[in-house]
Every structure is written in structure tokens, then in C-alpha cells.
């Protein structure tokens, strides 16, 4: 199926969901972030259909830590995606936007006792247990409320290649040393516990299926051993997220990924559910920032433009993939520019070696792509305001958050 492009060029202008970017007056008052709702919808439909084409028993849970914007969450819920949460705030936010608590997956290594009580009483789809001590607490709460609690177990498979999560780090339970097996044995002998799943998530920003599929092979081997030893047949295998944006995958890469995952899943002849938890993949390239060039400069032999879209919101994470282009359509005389923000920080660089027309200058506007994930959620009132948020809706632009302006920043810090 076709995925809505984030932008299109038509008659010498650039458009987002049929809205001419030159016509957006709000950009004149400071930088703004705009989500393309149509792309959110078509991209979520794309990944859902890609996997169900090969493995019908698939369920997509959007990991809301990537972007908390309520209209984004509501868009996914309206299109039959479910949500994954990792804290009491995220859990309550999911409920506020209309999520069914019985369709939520709860993750995280430090779930508080209060959060566990809440989600157990409200019968979430599954709690992915992250430690033996956490299982003990869940057993205690289950007895307190006479509840049968559905849980999964997050394991750390021994697949270190290109993994952000090495053995012995804080997430999950080690499989190689027998710690995971110990928890499984304990859980299946507890009358108030229903162990229904296995989860792993060892990778970030993957643009091919190789590492995740290799990890899945390892996990399935472990699951089949647990079936042989204890009769444990999980109802779901949760392979987490960690997917780069669609444009970073080769053509048909997601289709190949879905096919290869399906081949592995079918090694378990009881047809367990496949769960994916994409975050960045579903939102990052569904939003742009429009910012203004404040200064143009040379530093040695390097061209720089300084813009008013700042890294207090466009966080320079190692996995960030911001792409800068001019709002105007230029076709020739492209040269390399470094794009920096207005802050007194060397890390405040949005993109290096962006190809822009040598005609761009102070007062012109640029577009920053891939601005949908880990921007709003990690934004902070550091030196500059937090930009307002907009979303397109059937060719119209809707303001959905005012941002945090200078007066609100002053009030926050002066009044404590």
C-alpha cells in the first residue's frame, strides 16, 4: 500500500497534506512542529498489513514513550493499534485518550508498587516482568486482590551484535545463566499468575531485519526448550521495537522483515501471537519543524546557518536523524551547510553537511524532517521556548498545543 509522503512539491511550492508551507503564518512567530495525520494513518496501516500478510496473529502496540501528543495517540487508537506504556504517567495518559486498559502492555524495569496495583486491578493485557523481585511483588498484589494476573517475561538473549543492550545491563532477565528459566518455573507454579508471553528488545534504529530475526531465532529456541521442560507454551512473543524510519529501509525491506519473522514464528506450531512495539518508526518521519534562519556565517572553511529551531526540543540523541531542507524549492547551486541552533552549546547542531542552495539567507525558512519522535517528550525549558504543536487534518492545520512561551518559562522558574 502507499504511505502518505511527509511533503510533496507542486508548482514550485512544498505542501504537507495539501497545505502550502509558504501560507502557514504561524511560522512567523517562531518555530513550529507539524504532524501529518494522513501519514500517521497510512504508515500504521502499512506496518500492520505488512506483518498480517504473512502472520495473521499479529498485534501492533505503539510505544508511547516516542511521542506523547494526545492527537497522535488517538489517531493510532482510531486505527486499531494498541499502546505500550512504561510508567504511571504513561498509563494514565493512555486511559485519558481512550485506550482500553485490557489492551495495554506494561513494560519497564522499575514499575512502582502503586503502578502494579493499578494495572493489576484494571486487568491490563499483560505485564512484562523485568526481575524476580518484581514477580514476587506481583504475586503479593495478586493475592491481596484475589486476581489472576497475566504476565510476560522480558528476557535478554545472548545476541550482542549491534545490540544497544549488552548482557548484564539493567533491562530484562538473563537467559544464558538460567535466571529466566528460574522465573518461568516459579511463575507457572503460582496459582494467581498466568505466564502468557516472552518479550525481548535488544536493538535500536534498525534498518534491516538481520539482528532482530537472529535474536528471535535464539528466543524461539529458548521457548521450545521451556516447552519441553515445563510444558510452557507462550500465548505471545513480543519482539519489541527498535525500527528505524521507513525511508532508512531498503525497498521492500519491511516486507522481507515480516516474511522472515513469520517463518520463525511458525516454528512454534501452537500459533502464538506476534507483538511488535514500534515507536520511532510510527512517528518520527510523520512530523516536520519549520524554523527561520537567524544568521548565516562562515567559520574557517565551514558554512553555517543558525536557526531558531533549538536543541532544547530537537534533542541531539545518537539515534536522531534530522534532515534539513529549504522551504523554498531550489534546484541548483547546492552546497554543504552545517545547521546549528541559537544555544551556546557545541552539541546544538541539528545536521552537518546539509545540502542547501547557496542562495538561502537570513530570514528564509528551513524544514527539519524526522521531528516526530523523542522531541516533544524530551523537550525542556532551556534558554528558548518550547515550540507549539500542529497537526494536519483533511487539508486543514489545527493547533493542538500552545507550547511554552517565554512568559510561562519565567513564571515557572521565578515562582518555583
Image (cartoon, rainbow, N blue to C red):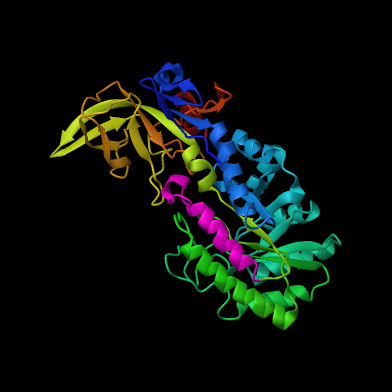
Query: Is 266 included in the stretch rendered in magenta?
Result: yes
Residue for point 74% across, 80% down = 230
Task: Give the quadrant of residue 206.
Answer: bottom left
Residue for point 66% across, 41% down = 93
Q: Residue furthest bottom?
A: 229
Q: Residue furthest left?
A: 300
Task: Give the quadrant of residue 221.
Answer: bottom right
Residue range of the region highlighted in magenta in the rendering: 243-267
In the rendered image of this protein, does residue 39 appear above or below residue 140? above
User: Can you see residue 52?
Assistant: yes
Which quadrant does the N terminus fall into?
A: top right
Residue for point 32% across, 25% down = 329
How many numbered marks are there? 0
Left/right of residue 91 with respect to residue 157 in the rendered view: right
Relative to the observer, which residue lies in front, 411 or 109? Answer: 109
Task: Give the quadrant of residue 116.
Answer: bottom right
Q: In the rendering, at what x and y percent does residue 98 appear?
A: 72, 38
Q: In the rendering, at what x and y percent does residue 384 appear?
A: 40, 31
Q: In the rendering, at what x and y percent does residue 41 appear?
A: 59, 37
Relative to the observer, which residue lies in front, 369 or 316? Answer: 369
User: Can you see residue 180?
Assistant: no
In the rendered image of this protein, does residue 260 appear above or below residue 182? above
Relative to the observer, which residue lies in front, 287 or 29? Answer: 287
Relative to the observer, which residue lies in front, 339 or 408? Answer: 339
Residue for point 61% across, 72% down = 220
In the rendered image of this protein, does residue 27 appear above or below residue 116? above
Q: Residue furthest right?
A: 146
The overriding secondary structure of the stretch rendered in magenta is: helix
Query: Is 163 included in the stretch rendered in magenta?
Result: no
Q: In the rendering, at what x and y percent does residue 69 appear?
A: 58, 36
Amino acid at each position: 500500500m502507499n504511505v502518505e509522503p511527509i511533503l510533496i512539491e507542486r508548482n514550485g511550492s512544498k505542501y504537507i497534506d495539501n497545505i502550502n508551507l509558504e501560507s502557514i503564518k504561524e511560522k512567523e512567530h517562531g518555530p513550529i512542529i507539524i504532524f501529518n495525520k494522513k501519514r500517521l494513518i497510512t504508515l500504521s496501516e502499512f506496518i500492520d498489513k505488512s506483518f498480517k500478510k504473512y502472520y495473521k496473529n499479529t498485534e501492533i502496540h505503539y510505544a508511547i514513550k516516542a511521542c506523547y501528543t494526545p492527537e497522535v495517540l488517538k489517531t493510532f487508537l482510531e486505527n486499531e493499534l494498541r499502546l505500550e506504556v512504561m510508567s504511571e504517567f504513561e498509563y494514565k495518559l493512555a486511559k485519558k485518550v481512550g485506550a482500553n486498559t485490557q489492551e495495554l502492555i506494561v513494560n519497564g524495569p522499575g514499575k512502582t508498587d502503586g503502578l502494579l496495583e493499578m494495572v493489576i486491578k484494571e486487568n491490563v493485557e499483560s505485564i512484562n516482568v523485568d526481575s524476580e523481585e518484581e514477580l514476587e511483588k506481583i504475586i503479593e498484589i495478586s493475592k491481596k486482590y484475589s486476581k489472576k494476573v497475566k504476565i510476560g517475561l522480558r528476557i535478554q538473549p545472548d545476541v550482542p551484535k549491534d545490540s544497544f543492550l549488552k548482557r548484564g545491563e539493567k533491562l530484562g532477565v538473563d537467559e544464558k545463566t538460567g535466571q529466566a528459566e528460574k522465573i518461568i518455573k516459579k511463575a507457572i507454579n503460582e496459582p494467581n499468575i498466568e505466564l502468557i508471553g516472552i518479550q525481548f528488545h535488544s536493538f535500536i534504529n534498525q534498518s534491516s531485519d538481520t539482528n532482530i530475526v537472529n535474536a528471535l531465532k535464539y528466543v524461539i529456541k529458548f521457548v521450545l526448550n521451556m516447552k519441553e521442560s515445563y510444558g510452557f507454551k507462550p500465548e505471545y512473543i513480543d519482539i519489541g521495537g527498535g525500527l528505524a524510519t521507513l525511508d532508512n529501509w531498503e525497498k521492500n525491506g519491511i516486507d522481507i522483515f515480516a516474511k522472515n519473522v513469520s517463518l520463525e514464528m511458525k516454528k512454534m506450531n501452537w500459533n502464538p501471537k506476534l507483538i511488535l512495539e514500534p515507536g520511532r518508526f510510527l512517528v518520527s518521519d510523520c512530523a516536520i519543524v519549520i524554523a527561520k534562519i537567524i544568521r548565516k556565517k562562515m567559520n574557517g572553511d565551514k558554512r553555517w546557518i543558525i536557526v531558531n529551531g533549538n536543541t532544547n526540543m530537537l534533542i541531539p540523541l545518537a539515534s536522531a536523524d534530522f534532515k534539513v531542507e529549504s522551504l523554498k524549492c531550489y534546484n541548483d547551486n547546492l552546497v554543504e551547510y552545517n545547521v546549528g541552533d541559537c544555544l551556546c552549546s557545541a552539541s546544538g547542531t541539528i545536521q552537518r553537511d546539509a545540502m542547501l542552495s547557496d542562495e538561502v539567507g537570513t530570514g528564509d525558512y528551513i524544514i527539519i524532517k524526522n521531528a516526530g519522535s523523542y522531541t516533544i517528550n524530551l523537550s525542556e525549558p532551556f534558554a528558548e521556548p518550547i515550540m507549539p504543536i500542529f497537526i494536519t487534518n483533511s487539508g486543514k492545520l489545527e493547533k493542538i498545543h500552545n507550547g511554552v512561551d517565554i512568559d510561562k518559562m519565567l513564571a515557572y522558574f521565578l515562582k518555583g
